[in-house]
Amino acid sequence: MTHLSCKKFLVILFLLVAFSLLADAEKPALLKLRYNENYSPTYDEVIEMYKQLDATYSQARLIEAGLTDSGRPLHTFVISRSGNFDAETIRSEGKTVVLINNGIHPGEPEGIDASLEFADDILRNKDGMGAWLEHSVLVIIPVYNIGGALNRSAYNRSGQTTPYETGFRGNYGNLDLNRDFTKCDSENARSFTRIFQYWNPDLFLDTHTTNGSDHQHAITMIPPQPDQFPGTMRDFLRKTFLPGLYREMGNGQYPLIPYVDYFYEDVRDGIRGGQEGPRFSSGYAALFHSYGMMTENLIYASYSDRVRSTYDFIRSLVKLSADHQQEILASRKKGIEESMTAGKFSLSYEIDTTRFQMIEFHGYEVDRQQISPVTGLPRLGYDRNRPFTASIRYYDTYKPLLEIDIPDYFVVPQAWKPVLERLALNKVEYRVLERDTIIRVLVDYLDEVTSQNRPYNGHFFHSQVLTRSEIQEVRYFAGDWIIPVRQERIRYILEMLEPKARDSFLRWNFFDSVLDQREYFSSFGFEENALRTLEEFPELKKGLEERRKTDPEFAKNHRAQLQYIYENSPWLEKSWKRYPVGKIMGRLEY
């Protein structure tokens, strides 16, 4: 290389380095948020601000990702340092994916403001935060419940004084979307499912606000409950991730504590950690070995503190996603392997009262004799002039209550199309029967199903399910589904298809037609067939005669005796109260 060429090369190298440093330099903020004025932006203002960020930064893109019940599109805002927004390619690069969901309850808008400010800050590289994007990609749902956000009012959330206007809790179909993740009734939930399955997030956050007990903490967290995860993931949560998250928040202005779920009347005697079921967003995330969590801001704190503490939480979460990139990815991969090779699966848990950890809690003394300024009568309240700090017990260990042997296959008849649609939406692998066939399966009979007296989020949820099992040869038809259980979505499959699971399709009424009896008998018309049946089945006749001898009332009741014959013979339909999803324990043979 000549001397001149060498000089040109050095100049070009210098310029490249300079441009690189310039690109990484901190830029001025683009967005003007007004949470300090107790104002949270409207839905249209939120989307307009994300459009500004999209137009300004090549590392960001606002994407229409499906419809909602309001007819408006559900957006994702993706921040990817490379400018690549394809999930499969990003996964192949080994980056962690963080998905943040905001505005599921639009009266709880802290996450909406905090995500906007954080997106602006990380894109402009405030405090060098842009470096985290070397290891992670951030996906933000700006507002999930768009119908609720458009139903904006100063009178939506009665226990909350700031911000002055907020959205409504229900969506356009008046559903609570944080009870809809598995039953998936809303267009919102179906679009969310596609987003979640497309991105397969390693970390998932849903931002909320609570009006529970008053205390000095602006922010609390419902963490991913470790004991519902496979061993590797449980250990990572307990030893690394959760301590790291509490530590990061403890270094700032807003120390983080678990959500205050009372275990005793006096909070100083201890609180318990929750274990969110699959109907909730974080419980849904856990079905796919994703570390899902919720923030719960305290409505009694100022709105500014609520937004800023949520901002700090998002900042801490994204930092940890970058700092522990390899551990997060490896733990999820190993956790899936452990789930797929396990012999048993826990359908329900109970809290272990013998195990706890100590946490520092900053509270206010309870005052049961505060005088209401509205009624002039005593009421329960908290005395903010009497703060206290206490070391309290936090019960966060669960043990299995009901375990099952994991089947190798489920057989789902095609007649239950809403179930098949939701399985497909969640990318469950299956094969379709090519011909009518008889398969030997384990079936469950629904001996007792207790429903709630009032509808719950559009359903009469089955709160109690008692079953018995037997082996039968059942006829299935071409087009029915065979689902191998030991696949990546094993937890979702078991939670949705095992009838006694917490939020199974059965509990949410998807199989209610099997609870109806379709064939009956009449006291007159059954006579001839009843006689023939007694001749065909001598043991049945013997049992009838013995029952007559031992039960005088039965012996005098014509209808009861016919019913005995009907229910203890082939006349009783085998499909009545038989859960239609069959189980195969072992090899698939048909």
Image (tube, rainbow, N blue to C red):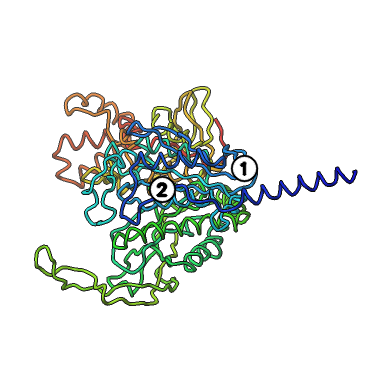
Q: Please, which residue is most extreme toward the right here?
A: 2
Residue denoted by label 2: 281
Q: Which residue is mark 1?
A: 82
- Give left or right: position of 100 versus 17: left
111 in relation to 422, above or below: below
Picture quadrant of residue 552: top left
Establish if 378 lies above or below 184: below
When asked about the image quadrant of residue 262, the answer is bottom left
- Picture quarter with the N terminus: top right
Q: Residues within 10 Å of mark 2 (few under 14, many from 20)?
A: many
Viewer-proximal residue among 195 and 486: 195
Q: Which mark is residue 172?
A: none
Q: Residue furthest left?
A: 376
Q: Nearer the viewer, residue 74 or 350?
A: 74
Q: Answer yes or no: is residue 409 visible.
A: no
Q: Secondary structure at mark 2?
A: helix
Under mark 2, the amino acid is Ser
Q: Does residue 305 appear in this view? A: yes
Q: Nearer the viewer, residue 260 or 344?
A: 260
Camera-nearest residue between 571 and 290: 290
Instruction: Report the amino acid beneath label 1.
Output: Ser
Q: Position of residue 439 (x, y in %)?
A: 49, 31
The image shows residue 494 at horizontal and vertical percentages of 46, 45
Position of residue 491 in the picture relative to residue 503 (left or right):
right
